[in-house]
Image (cartoon, grey):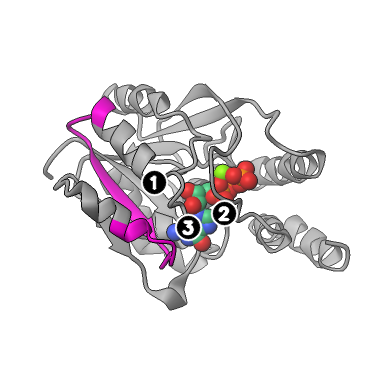
Amino acid sequence: MKGTCTVILPTYKESANIVRMVETLRQMYPDFKVLIMDDNSDDGSRELVETLNDPMVRFFVREPRDRGLSASIFQGIMETDTEYFVNMDCDFQHPPSAIGDIYSELEDGADLCIGVRAERTALSPMRWMASWAAHFLAVLTLWLRNKKKSKDIMSGLFGGRTDTFKEVISRDSSEFEMKGFKALYDLMKFAPEDLHVKEIEFEFGTRRGGESKLSSTVILSLLRQSEPFGKILAKLAEKTL
Ligand SMILES: Nc1nc2c(ncn2[C@@H]2O[C@H](COP(=O)(O)OP(=O)(O)OP(=O)(O)O)[C@@H](O)[C@H]2O)c(=O)[nH]1
Ligand SMILES: [Mg+2]
């Protein structure tokens, strides 16, 4: 494998943030590749990235029928050709400085390093409750499957050993929730039982620019990921959300 690490940025209509994010990452981590997994944003994101003309930056346009955040992350990992990958949001809610902390843990031997949100003031009360319920069900599910757990299974900031997760995706992706927002949870559900997991803490901020894509459909799909209890809750919630 060539290079050391690829930063995967799943994007949908992030033209307000994309250039600043790519430039920040390239400045801070000149040896790292940047892989943008874009779901056919029609907001000029592609053109903006192309003007940077940087061979370490790849803009991947995804198949329109296959739209979804989790699906983008899994495909991003499959497209990665470096030893490690780190996945992060493009709206600066995940601080670029955390990438270096995650990379150090991977180099020190972790198979997976999760960015744990220390401060969640950016979440509304409704989101906070949904997030808490989803976390509780996820811990239970992972415990029942005898898998490694984390303080923040729903985090979108995480890095891993590429080969390990390519194997998990190739073997088990038919069981994943592709339209979901929580790729990490699926990866943890199907990862080897002896996975070496580390965590780093980071301050979870508010979105810098552009618009949120989280909707009630996403919250429902999140609940569906925690069978069997979550599926029942999702059925009940469908009527109220
Ligand atoms: N490829 C792809 N990326 C997506 C999709 N939906 C969201 N994203 C990206 O995933 C990241 C997280 O999405 P956000 O909309 O910020 O979700 P969030 O952080 O839970 O919501 P906010 O707190 O309101 O920002 C961002 O980089 C988005 O551009 C999608 O359907 N496909
Ligand atoms: Mg966000």
Q: Quadrant of the C terminus?
A: bottom right
Asked if the residue at label 3 sits under 8 Å from ligand 1, the reply is yes
Q: Which residue is at the front of the view, 176 or 239?
A: 239
Vertical placement of residue 104 versus 49, above or below: above
**In magenta segment, residue 113:** no
Query: SS class of the residue under badge 2?
Result: loop
Q: What label sits on residue 13 in the rendered view?
A: 3
x, y percent for residue 97: 39, 24
Distance from disc 3 to disc 1, alpha carbons, whole Å, reads 9 Å
What amino acid is at disc 2?
Answer: Phe
Q: Is residue 121 above or below residue 181?
A: above
Q: Position of residue 100 (x, y in %)?
A: 33, 24
Q: Residue at x 13, y 45 (%)?
A: 1
Q: Hey, which residue is sitting farthest bottom in the picture?
A: 65
Looking at the rendered structure, the secondary structure element under dot 3 is loop
Q: Which residue is mark 2?
A: 181
Q: Earlier in the sequence, mark 2 or mark 3?
A: 3
